[in-house]
Amino acid sequence: FAGDLSQELAWVEALQSVEPGQLQALLPHPPPRDDLAAWREVAQLLARVHRELAADNLDISDVLQQATQLPGFNETARWKVLEDLRARYLRILDNLQLWDQQTARLFAIDHQLCRCESSIVLVGLADMNGVLRSMLDQLSGSVTALIFAPQSHSPRFNAHGCLNPTAWLDDSIAIDDRQITVTEGPGEQADAVIRALASFAGQYAADEITIGAVDERLVPTIEQRLKECGLRGRFAGGTPLARSGPYRLLAELAEYAEHRQVASLAALVRHPGIERWLHARGIGDDCLPEIDELLVKRLPSRIDADLAKQLPTESLARQTLAALEELVASLNHEPRVPGAWGEVTVAILRQVYGGRNWNPRIDAERQVIVACDQIIDATRELSRLNDQLAPHITGSEALRWLLDELASKSIPPTADPGAIELLGWLELPLDDAPALVLVGLNEGIVPASRNGDAFLPDTLRRQLQIEDNERRYARDAYALHVLAASRKELRIIVGRRTSAGDPLLPSRLLFAAPDDLLAPRTLRCFHERHAQPRLVFADSPRPGDAARFDPPRPRPLAEPVTSMRVTEFRDYLACPYRYYLKHRLKLSAASDEAHELDELQFGTLMHDVLAAFAEGDLTNSTDPHVIGHFLEAELKSLVRSRFSHSAWPAVGVQLELARQRLRGFARWQSEWRAQGNELRFSEDSIPDDEAELIVDQQPMKLRGRIDRIDFNPKTREWFIFDYKTSAAGKTPQQVHQNRSSWVDLQLPLYRHLAKGLGVGGRVSLGYIVLPASVSDTKHLTAPWSDAELAEADEVAAGVIRDVRA
């Protein structure tokens, strides 16, 4: 038999063997021939149609024959192309001496090859496809279908024990309104589950209760709430393999090996397996801050060899990049058949996960073991792929193929007799627990509907008598009948919203009720009501409860504070505690998600360009073009030295904005100098620790750098300026004062710094604003009186006293 992947690739070969013109009716815009991923998507779609038809003992010729009876059917040309493709597909497999599994079943039925002398009992098969029914009809042994229903319902089932869909469409389901709870999102639904369990008042043991997770997306939230109650939940569906460490490792490695994306690097260095692997190579946790700093400061959109070479040889970031390059090196070989990449994949898993004893009794470690086993099994399947079908692919593509094959698999849970079982919808009718809580019974989940199918819309499905929306409804209606009739306790919980806040509707199965119940049930399901308070347990976080999390109190400093930067005062006035964390403990936020310069980086870049101008020979120039040319050249030089040549596109836009603002500054500077003002000092020429404030007979040294100090010889006036590159261009008063209160002391304290440079007499404090609107480039001076400045000094003295205390 051809495996799933072999069948898919045979469809790809069939598609590519047809001239593009002949495909027009089916595929008006075929993908490029070398875009294998796109061709596989088309192949998967055709394989699904072929598989679904064959499951009900049909092929494409049957569609062409029966569909013509549908009024308005105009898809004949498309289905004829599909019929030709199916014939090509089967010939390809025949030439390789492989069976198409669906065709093999049809062949077996046509040639009366199905045999079984034993008796067969069918349990829980309320719906069977046509192939299975035809096979059962050929057996000589007896076939008995066990049906859970009253004898009076026997006309609703056919000779195979399957549902007659039309008999269930208008049937009422015996559910009491008191069994239904309508609540809001996932958290509230999980709370409703806990309330339902509490309503059983201890009558049932854990193994006598089942939680039916109709919407399986609710399972993690329910498990968390059970844990907070001191209960255990066990979801029979297990943990999706795609959430396991080994699966995520291969996914990130595939992305990193192919594109060197920043996001992949950030994910890899945080992957637990990679962290341990780096530790084993002598690269510790300190590599994370260095990697984050690299991504935030240089802003690369991708990682390349040039970026690594710019880092110091001994830096942990460079060592980490080199180690990852070594790990993915085996994926960068020339393309080869998929099976040849299996050994490479296993070698990567061995590198990262080998060398330690994994304990299967520890659930987290057991999941790694099972995930690796399933991945290795999948590599064996790849190796069995027929070489004549197998294209040559890269290592990254091979990993993606492998992960595609594994995406639907899961890691089964361990046995836990004391846990409450969580089951999916399809498993519930055969579960024997007397108490059942159904959660997530919403429309679109149960009953499921398939609308807008590209090949098999519902009208065509009904004509072909294959699975349609009526059949799905009947199947789900019967399941809810079974649950309502077989449980001593049944609670049904319906949500109004998803976790994203999108609205949900109650399942229409709830409205399969007698006419006299429809109006009250509709009111119950749609009437707005006050949400019940969230449940709080011993281990639950309580909103607003300070006792749940006490911020660490500041500790006495090893040495007293004897100097402060002038910018520190603003932080202290805003929040003394955050001041302590930032300036005394030197803590800062870390991120690896920067895609553009933040406000501080943009301002620093502008300041550095302007500082270079202040140190150059053009400070006396009144030609804006000459000044502007210098500033642009300096900007380009700094950008080349600081940022990756593959920086994010937004960085290029920001640099253009910086260039425009510098052009505005050049115009202002030429006019300012023409008025007789001279640039006397720039930030690099201010000595450190030469200014101080005396508070309570003790000096507090002030540190800081003033962007520039200008002097007008004619008026004998000094100007202390700070550059401001924010988009709005706020005035000094707006920044420093909130109504009558001081919130920033930077400019007033600059007076004390400047005294060490001999700046005295008439002194103006202000900003040179370089806002988004270049025409608004100007200087803004603060009209503070001596009394107001003295008040600012008093506020600074108060801050110093508090910091000392």
Image (tube, helix red, strand yellow):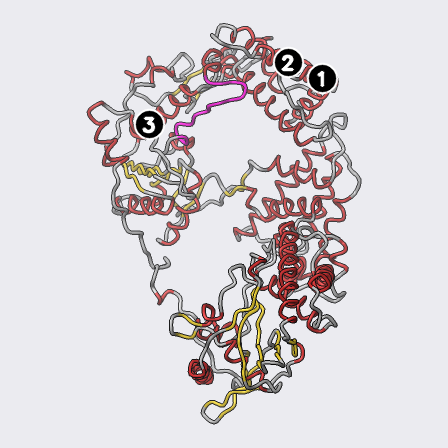
Q: Three-letter amino acid code at disc 1?
A: Val
Residue 279 falls left or right of residue 571: right
Query: Which of the image's four quarters has the N terminus?
Result: top right
| Magenta residues, dominant SS class | loop
- Give the number of the disc on residue 81: 2
Around disc 3, counting alpha carbons within 10 Å, would you say few (fewer than 14), some (14 to 19), or many (20 or more)? Answer: many
Camera-nearest residue between 262 and 545: 262
Camera-nearest residue between 617 and 422: 617
Which element is circle 1 on? loop
* Above-or-below relation of 591 to 669: above
Residue 547 falls left or right of residue 371: left
Q: Quadrant of residue 401?
A: top right
Q: Three-letter amino acid code at disc 2?
A: Val
Q: Give the extent of the magenta segment.
A: 444-458
Q: Earlier in the sequence, mark 2 or mark 1?
A: 1
Q: Which residue is mark 1?
A: 18
The residue depicted at 30 percent of the width and 33 percent of the height is 487
Q: Which residue is mark 3?
A: 509
Camera-nearest residue between 601 and 95: 601
Q: Three-letter amino acid code at disc 3?
A: Leu
The residue depicted at 44 percent of the width and 21 percent of the height is 122
* Above-or-below relation of 543 to 439: below
- Spot the residue most to the right: 334
Mark 1 in CB contact with mark 3 (< 8 angstroms)? no
* Above-or-below relation of 487 to 411: above
Q: How far across and how far down the image is residue 678, in percent?
A: 65, 76
